[in-house]
Image (tube, rainbow, N blue to C red):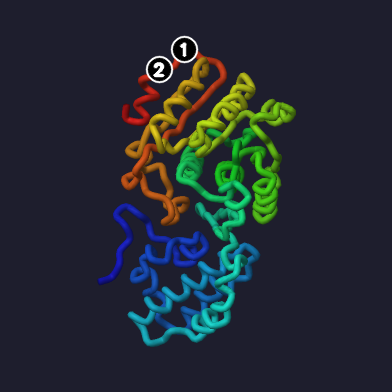
Amino acid sequence: MASAAPEGVSLFPLPRYYFSLYPVGSIPWALLLVPYVTWEAQEALIDETIYADLTCSPPLKYSVAFVKRLVTELGRITDEVHDLWYEFIAQNNAELNTPESERGFIAYRVGDSSISLGYDVSGRFIEQGTTGLSQWEAGRYLASWLVANKCAVEGKDVLELGSGSGLVGLVAAGFSAARRVVLTDGNALVVKALRANVKSNKLDNVEVAELNWDDQSRSDLLESAEVLLGADLTYDPTIVGALMATIRRMRRDAVCYLCSAVRTDSTWREFLKLLDGLDVKVLVPGPAQWEGLVREEFLAGRCPRPKDLDMDIVLLEIRPRASCDIVTNEIDFAIGA
């Protein structure tokens, strides 16, 4: 039986699945391979994927897995499977047990624009005490919201807190026309990787700075930012105090968009207590409200769609001056209290 795309999900050209590191078991091969049953068509696909002249290629381990599955699926519909697919597998199989085979790039495309981010699953960053290069659910959802709500950052100076891979900030710069974006993180290894991501994307309006939330010496970063962005920063109760202290130091006319995955009610409620005295609005309270906002380009088969989430993802708008007292019940609604 031919596989089909999930209901409500648009199909993309096959190379886009490849460069977004879409899980090979979830790619709708039967639908996508129909145009590639001839030798000539496969040569064109080879040039657009595994032999594309790019510096930002997927990790080798993913590329080999992609080609192996492609060859299997092609064999179901045609006897003409190009020799170059097999040559690619044979040439690279021996390298699959090296850490380098797990490092490469993941690409996100919206319209004619794309951004590429370093992708490393070798364990190197986890051993250094950070998961900073991972792209978590809240970051993918906030990136989608920024594309749908371009006016939130368009023409403005933006500061991203705890940037990690830089997905959110680079989307603000590359897809949503922010005037200037500063990506920040407190981990030196992550900051180095962020600089590499900025360089690979050739975005002149993006800078990188190391920023520890306990360090008040970089007040200049907060003073120049009209918009603060943050995704998945509230999961650890030991750091949310420092996070909120940093947010409270933003300009009086600034706004912070903070997107959080609510993994445990107790941690979320402790975080809510730190919002006292701020002007807080719940822009998106949960999965149902994300429907129609989240873009398949950012989910990339690696992040649940809203209807499949097993947690709430909440987007807050935070301003420094409270126009009225926080309506605690309204924020509690964001976790179904």
75 left or right, relative to 138: left
Relative to 7, is 95 above or below? below
Are the residues flagged by discs 2 and 1 in contact, CB closer than 8 Å? yes
Q: Residue at x 61, y 21 (%)?
A: 253
125 left or right, relative to 75: right
75 left or right, relative to 117: left
Callout 2 amino acid: Val
Inspect this view and state whether residue 255 appears.
no
Q: Could you tell me residue 172's position as x and y percent?
A: 58, 42
Relative to 42, is 247 above or below? above
Q: Residue at x 44, y 31 (%)?
A: 267
Q: Residue at x 43, y 48 (%)?
A: 295
Circle number at residue 228 = none
Q: Could you tell me residue 97's position as x and y percent?
A: 56, 71
Observer-nearest residue: 111 or 284? 284
Image quarter of residue 265? top left
Relative to 142, is 105 above or below? below
Of circles 2 and 1, which is in front? 2
Residue denoted by label 2: 327
Residue denoted by label 1: 324
Inspect this view and state whether residue 95 appears.
yes
In what element is the residue under mark 1? loop
Observer-nearest residue: 52 or 89? 89
